[in-house]
Image (cartoon, coloured by chain):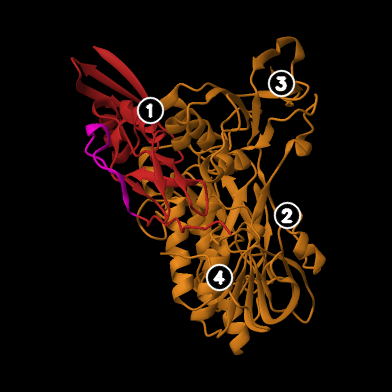
């Protein structure tokens, strides 16, 4: 029997959620005051995921960095590893919003895509 | 593809918008839509879009676009519309002055000083961050002390890391977002220090930016000294007592080379002051009517220059209103003047707009002074609504429909947020009208 605690992010109330589990199977969720809270606790307990937003180096662009995101949430424990990969990436302007920068990053099933157009600038 | 092109600007415009952030872009679009033929956006950065370009995290647009976007995606959607609607955008340009006849004085490196004339103006200059000077932290003045938003610009646009080991003062959303951002870029975050007994940022950011990465949050604790000659070497932090005075014999040192400040925003109203717009001492922004018009005829204002918003979606909403009325003002359509003044009452710090009318529906934004667990919002004697949970960091929105005011004949209404009596029951919470705002991060 294990007890895990989560802070609900559904609304400003910030309910303190408690999940009781037996061999990883959820026995009971306590502390929620709405349906969303219960679902959140179950999701966080069984398969916590996060959308990763970061940036990659871009050359010849209006700015030095191109903002990117994963097009679907990745497992929470992979977030740091995804960012380590992104630190090694360099792109070249121009880039369009939605352009795929990396396909299936670290086999998470998520692609890394640009979140803006990056117009090119040419040295004057 | 959005492009950055040198716009040939004309000598006369119907509506001139000062500031090309989310407020300015939405105002320009709405002005155009309302019939203003020539609309100009002036921005001092190298492209319009404002602070959204550096807010690369997600959480924007849930209200307005009904989907979760990152800051750059939100900005680009608006900028594309602006360009499609044949609105002129001039970047790298400052507005020096606007006079009573709406002669707008501009300055840029490329074109020098120019004067253009406008028939209406929209102030959308946004806000700037409070700095070390605002809270007078003792110590030396080394490099490495900066606001969280500046660090965000360094990391997300310019590609510099501000330091190797960072302490963050203030638990505002920008500070929390930067704690995560720097961690993901390989910087060590020593901790977040908050003088108040509760966190200032959204619960979601506490979880996803601090808990996820094991970054400690020290409540009721503040920075009492900054050390270092050329570069920050460490900061001294101390817990505070009930009156927020540091307890010096419990202080400790935190080694770091950078201190980020996330201690609030100030509406940027130098231009408003210069053109003698009447300002509200509480919000720090212009006093506005229900059409978002300031005390100067034909000068409108919207966004963070009026009051600090929690969500960009609300900025957009307010700016669409301001822009529409600026456009209508040019085409000669003016709604009836406001006839009711809104007065902040019990536990209400401010409300915007400052006046409303009885002929149409209004959205009023307000902020409370103190947190309340179970509360109710009361508008004079004419309207009452249950609220679930209120605290100062979260803006409350109130829809005032004409029907509410039909039997009201006074000239001012007080807005109160009062405790509700009796004990909490779950049904009670479910009955309460949909609260105000879902918590969505924004920085």
For the residues carrying marks 2 and 3, which lies nearer the camera in this image? 2
Q: CA distance from mark 1 to mark 4?
A: 39 Å
Q: Which mark is residue B27?
A: 4
Which residue is label 1 attached to?
A80
Farthest residue in the bottom direction? B332
Report the side of A52 relative to B206 (left or right): left
From which residue to which does the magenta span run?
Answer: A98-111
- Marks 3 and 4 share the same chain: yes
Q: Name the chain letter of the residue that bears numbered label 4.
A: B
| Real-space CA distance between mark 3 and mark 4, rounded to the nearest whole angstrom | 45 Å
Check residue B241 in the rendering and tell me which mark sits there, or answer none. 3
Residue drawn 49% across the image and 73% down it: B403
User: On the image, numbered disc 2 is attached to which residue?
Assistant: B284
Q: CA distance from mark 2 to mark 3?
A: 29 Å
- Specify which label sits upstream in the sequence, 2 or 4: 4
Q: Residues within 10 Å of mark 1 (few under 14, many from 20)?
A: some
Residue B44 placed where, x, y %? 65, 61
- Asked if residue B390 is positioned above or below residue B94 in the image, the reply reads above
Q: Nearer the viewer, mark 2 or mark 1?
A: 1
The answer to which of B159 and B387 lies nearer the viewer is: B159
Q: Taking B211 as reference, is A95 above or below it?
A: below
* Residue at image point 48% right, 65% down: B3
- B391 or B239: which is nearer to us? B239
Can residue B343 be seen here?
yes
Q: State which chain is coloured red.
A: A
For the point 54% across and 71% down, which residue is it? B321
Answer left or right for A106 relative to B266: left
């Amino acid at each position: 029997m294990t007890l895990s605690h989560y802070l609900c992010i559904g609304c400003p109330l910030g309910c303190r959620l408690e999940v009781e589990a037996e061999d990883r199977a959820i026995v009971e969720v306590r502390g929620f005051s709405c349906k969303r809270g219960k679902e959140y606790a179950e999701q966080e307990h069984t398969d916590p995921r996060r959308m990763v937003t970061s940036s990659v180096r871009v050359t010849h662009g209006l700015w030095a960095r191109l903002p990117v995101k994963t097009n679907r949430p990745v497992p929470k424990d992979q977030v740091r590893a995804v960012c380590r990969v992104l630190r090694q990436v360099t792109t070249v302007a121009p880039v369009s919003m939605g352009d795929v920068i990396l396909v299936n990053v670290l086999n998470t099933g998520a692609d890394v895509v640009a979140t803006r157009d990056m117009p090119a600038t040419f040295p004057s | 593809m959005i492009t950055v092109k040198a716009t040939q600007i004309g000598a006369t415009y119907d509506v001139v918008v000062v500031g090309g952030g989310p407020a300015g872009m939405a105002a320009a679009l709405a002005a155009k839509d309302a019939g203003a033929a020539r609309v100009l956006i002036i921005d001092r950065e190298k492209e319009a879009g404002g602070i959204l370009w550096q807010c690369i995290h997600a959480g924007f647009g849930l209200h307005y676009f009904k989907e979760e976007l990152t800051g750059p995606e939100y900005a680009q959607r608006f900028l594309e519309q602006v360009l499609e609607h044949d609105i002129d955008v001039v970047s790298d340009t400052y507005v020096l002055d606007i006079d009573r006849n709406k002669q707008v004085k501009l300055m840029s490196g490329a074109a020098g000083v120019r004067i253009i004339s406008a028939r209406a103006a929209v102030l959308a200059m946004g806000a700037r961050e409070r700095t070390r000077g605002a809270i007078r932290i003792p110590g030396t003045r080394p490099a490495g002390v900066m606001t969280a938003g500046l660090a965000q610009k360094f990391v997300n646009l310019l590609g510099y890391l501000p330091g190797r080991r960072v302490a963050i003062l203030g638990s505002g959303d920008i500070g929390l977002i930067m704690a995560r951002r720097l961690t993901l870029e390989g910087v060590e975050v020593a901790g977040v220090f908050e003088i108040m007994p509760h966190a200032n940022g959204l619960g979601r950011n506490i979880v996803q930016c601090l808990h996820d990465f094991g970054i400690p949050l020290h409540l009721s604790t503040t920075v009492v000294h900054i050390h270092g000659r050329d570069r920050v070497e460490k900061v001294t932090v101390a817990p505070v007592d009930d009156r927020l005075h540091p307890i010096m014999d419990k202080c400790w040192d935190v080694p770091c080379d950078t201190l980020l400040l996330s201690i609030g925003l100030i509406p940027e109203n130098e231009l408003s002051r210069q053109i003698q717009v009447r300002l509200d001492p509480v919000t720090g922004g212009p006093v506005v009517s229900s059409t978002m018009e300031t005390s100067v005829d034909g000068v409108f204002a919207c966004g963070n220059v009026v009051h600090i918003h929690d969500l960009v979606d609300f900025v957009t909403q307010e700016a669409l209103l301001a822009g529409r009325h600026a456009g209508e003002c040019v085409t000669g359509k003016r709604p009836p003047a406001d006839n009711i003044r809104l007065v902040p009452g019990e536990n209400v710090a401010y409300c915007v707009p400052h006046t409303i009318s009885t002929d149409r529906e209004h959205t009023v934004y307000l902020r409370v002074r103190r947190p309340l667990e179970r509360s109710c919002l009361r508008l004079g004697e004419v309207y009452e609504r249950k609220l679930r949970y209120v605290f100062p960091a979260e803006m409350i929105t109130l829809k005032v429909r004409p029907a509410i005011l039909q039997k009201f004949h006074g000239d001012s209404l007080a807005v109160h947020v009062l405790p509700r009596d009796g004990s909490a029951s779950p049904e009670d919470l479910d009955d309460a009208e949909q609260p105000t705002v879902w918590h969505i991060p924004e920085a």
